[in-house]
Image: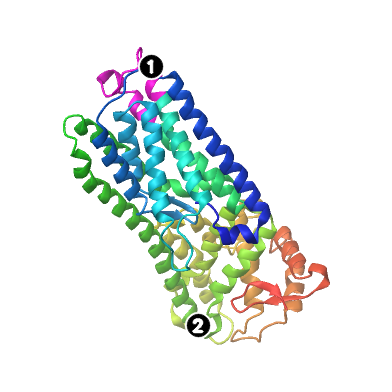
Amino acid sequence: MIVNHAQARRNPGLDVRIAAVVSLTAAAAILVNATWIAAWHGSVLDRWPLLVLLIALGATASHFPVELTPKFKTNTATAVHFAILLLYPPPVAIAAVGLAVLAGNGSLALRRNHLGQRRRGVYDTVFNVAQTMIATSAAATVLYAGRPQQDMVPLVPADAWAIPAAAAMSYVTTTFLVSAIVGIQTSRNPWHVFLATQRIDVPAEAALYLIGFVTAILALSRPWAPLVMVIPTAVVYLSTKRAVLLHEQTIAAVEAMADMVDKRDRYTAEHSMRVAANVAVIAPAMGLSPEEVSLIRLAARVHDLGKIALPDSILGKDGKLTGGEFALMKEHPRHGWEILSRFPQYHRGRDIVLSHHERIDGRGYPRGLRGNQIPLGAQIVAVADALDAMTSDRPYRAALPLHQAMTELRLGRGTQWSAAVVDTVDRLLNVENRELSFGTVGALSTT
């Protein structure tokens, strides 16, 4: 979850910030455990063989991560950590969870990835141990808040409300800390990092906390129960991994369909790739967050998908379209919206696809939106789309030089296209008076 040593050397400033946050997190972990040790007056369970087994299972789980987003991973150790919390008093549970994470990350540090880098660095290990101990402490605080005495095992009916509340506290604390450190690493808003993982992460984590609860119940009378609970835990792991893979494969399949549409016309081959590449330059220059840029780029890659419903006689026609043919062409944003409505990955991006031919003056299609009624993402795609279309060969005209295409954009500024977007492109194409041109896939880059 933390930058590796190679990244740190390339960015000393980032290294200092990461080191400071990791140090504070580690100090907080030590403090909370010391506080529990001083405050705890209950007895301690003597079932150490079971504790050793749980620590070993937690360490093993660290070797089976699922990457939800770059730098944000999850694994099935949550079930083990929660079972430890329910079976042992807080001072023991916090230390045991930290030991499990340390053993898991320490053994991962001995392995290398395909780039020859260690799978866990020092920062990674220290932070992961510390944040898990803090989350366990926070969960223990909720778990024991309403208890009249410090019982050893909080698994009685009176604790029915406290157990799910403790699970929620553990999850929120862990996710908050991880989102914060990933946000620092990637210069992203931690809230956006948090939201990017929830669709897949929440159901999986809820299932793992439930498995941890059941494991604790069974382990009270059957110390070998954790071994049996490996099976449902593995099911959750495989389901989560499959959900992530399905998400990625769905996007790849939809983009492949969009590329096939482009290839039906020799003049528009790789058009969507170029538009998406330019969007990825324009959107950040307008101050949009990485999450918003990613959303708009995703929509730009498939903005012409609806043309799949049009006949070849229209897509490949040499010359301008007739009125009737253009009327059919104007329906392709709706067709694209309808196709994308079937995929949750495009729940937000589909409106950008629907609106990318709208005009600021309200004379666009298919809905005749005007001004701010048009999603900002669609305004950006519209300019990127028009710029690529004008600078590409068409059956009825040759490609325009970039300076002439920019003149056309300026003439349509505030009427056909968003003034803010056109101004941004103008600025990008004239940074320090150096003319910019398209790269191999359409990205705006210096010559």
The kind of secondary structure element at disc 1 is: loop
Q: Is residue 237 depicted above or below 155 in this figure?
A: below
Looking at the rendered structure, the kind of residue marked 1 is His
Residue 265, label in figure? 2
Outermost residue, right side: 433
- Residue 361 in sight here: no
Residue 436 x %, y %: 74, 75
Label annotation for residue 75: none
Secondary structure found at label 2: loop
Q: Is residue 142 left or right of residue 212?
A: right
Name which residue lies at 35% across and 12% down.
Answer: 148
The magenta-colored residue range is 142-166
User: Label 1, on which residue?
Assistant: 41
Distance from Cα at disc 2 to Cα at disc 1: 77 Å
Question: Which image quarter: residue 446?
Answer: bottom right
User: Residue 161 colored magenta?
Assistant: yes
